[in-house]
């Protein structure tokens, strides 16, 4: 934490990050009773596919800064321009630029419905694809389930599965390992979900009051959730990434 905070305070170039982020076309639109912020980058190809990207926690649309140019302009990276996408990347309601104090809460279903309205009603796409990781994977899955007529397809890099152990009455060895890992995860790694989901305001005062506290709250997840052996920077550089 000391090394990260020292870098953040003395050497991190926020203006460079700001300039990088502001290269993307960004908009704010009244939708579902709130102001939804989103990136909207047109694809460069003969028939770009509309693609909705949904981020997760802890995260934001800034996570997509490297992949958006690859998706929108594949020819620039040596790939087929016929594979171009037009990317729409909203900030999830309740996150960063889609948040104002005292606005209503959104469930996964609420977010999926808002994003379907964004893509079709507001932006005029008849059908689109959706990709998501973490919380965004739940949103993409919900879009596929609730709006199949609108979806070209979905891609997720987190699979939302049931946690009901009763469905495994006579588990195999592989399923038994899964249950052991699941129980370990539920015991050791979900505390943040309960406090953020039930008493977020109390936590918010503490984290907002202490930038170091907020950094530690988030960095702990990168340390626990990556195969880093306790050394986060062996897999993710603090420079411009963490």
Image (tube, helix red, strand yellow):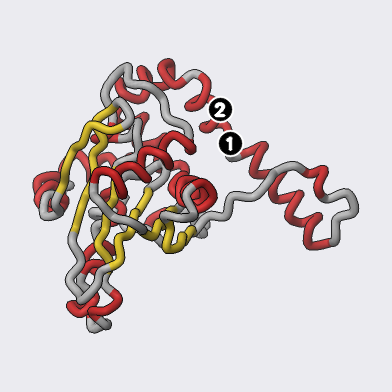
Can you tell which quarter of the image residue 129 is in? bottom left
Q: Nearer the viewer, residue 241 or 135?
A: 135
**Which element carries disc 2, helix, strand or loop?**
helix
Give the percent coordinates (x, y) of residue 73. Answer: 20, 72
- How busy is the neighbourhood of tag 1: few (under 14 within 10 Å), some, or many (20 plus)? few
Residue at numbered disc 1: 190
Locate residue 179 relative to residue 26 in the image: left or right. right
Is residue 9 at least partly visible in the picture? yes
Q: Is residue 54 left or right of residue 157?
A: left
Residue 210 on image: x %, y % = 31, 25
Badge 2: residue crowd in 10 Å (few <14, some 14–19, many ≥20): few
* Residue contact at pointers 2 and 1, CB within 8 angstroms: yes
Camera sees residue 225: no
Residue 194 marker: 2
Residue lying farthest right? 170
Is 184 left or right of 128, judged from the image as shown? right
Where disc 1 sits, the SS reads: loop
Q: CA distance from mark 2 to mark 1?
A: 7 Å
The residue under the point 28% across, 33% down is 31
At a point 24% along the width and 44% down the height, the residue shown is 122
**Above or below, comparing residue 193 to residue 74 in the picture:** above
Name the mark on residue 151: none
The structure residue drawn at horizontal position 37% and vertical position 48%, both measured from the top left corner, is 55
Q: Is residue 55 left or right of residue 5?
A: right
User: What x and y, as percent, mark residue 89?
Assistant: 29, 50
**Whole-percent x, y for residue 10 in the image:** 16, 42
Q: Is residue 150 above or below residue 6?
A: below
In the rendered view, would you say 224 is above or below 110?
A: below
Q: How many marks?
A: 2
Q: Quadrant of residue 1?
A: top left
Look at 39% across and 36% down and name the residue there: 216
In the rendered view, tell whether residue 26 sits above or below residue 81.
Answer: above
């Amino acid at each position: 934490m000391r090394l990260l905070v020292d870098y953040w305070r003395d050497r991190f170039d926020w203006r460079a990050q700001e300039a990088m982020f502001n290269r993307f076309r960004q908009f704010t639109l009244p939708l579902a009773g709130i102001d939804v912020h989103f990136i909207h980058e047109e694809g460069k190809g003969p028939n770009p596919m509309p693609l909705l990207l949904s981020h997760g926690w802890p995260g934001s649309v800034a996570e997509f800064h490297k992949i958006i140019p690859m998706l929108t302009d594949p020819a620039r990276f040596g790939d087929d321009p016929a594979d171009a996408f037009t990317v729409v990347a909203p900030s999830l309601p309740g996150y960063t630029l889609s948040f104002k104090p005292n606005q209503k809460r959104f469930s996964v279903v609420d977010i999926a419905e808002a994003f379907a309205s964004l893509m079709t009603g507001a932006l005029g796409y008849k059908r689109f694809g959706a990709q998501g990781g973490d919380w965004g994977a739940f949103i993409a899955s919900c879009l596929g389930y609730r709006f199949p007529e609108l979806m070209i397809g979905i891609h997720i890099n987190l699979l939302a599965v049931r946690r009901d152990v009763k469905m495994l009455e006579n588990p195999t060895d592989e399923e038994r390992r899964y249950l052991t890992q699941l129980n370990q995860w539920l015991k050791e790694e979900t505390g943040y979900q309960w406090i953020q989901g039930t008493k977020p305001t109390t936590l918010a005062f503490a984290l907002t009051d202490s930038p170091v506290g907020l950094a530690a709250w988030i960095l702990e997840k990168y340390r626990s959730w990556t195969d880093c052996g306790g050394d986060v920077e062996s897999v993710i550089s603090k420079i411009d990434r963490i």
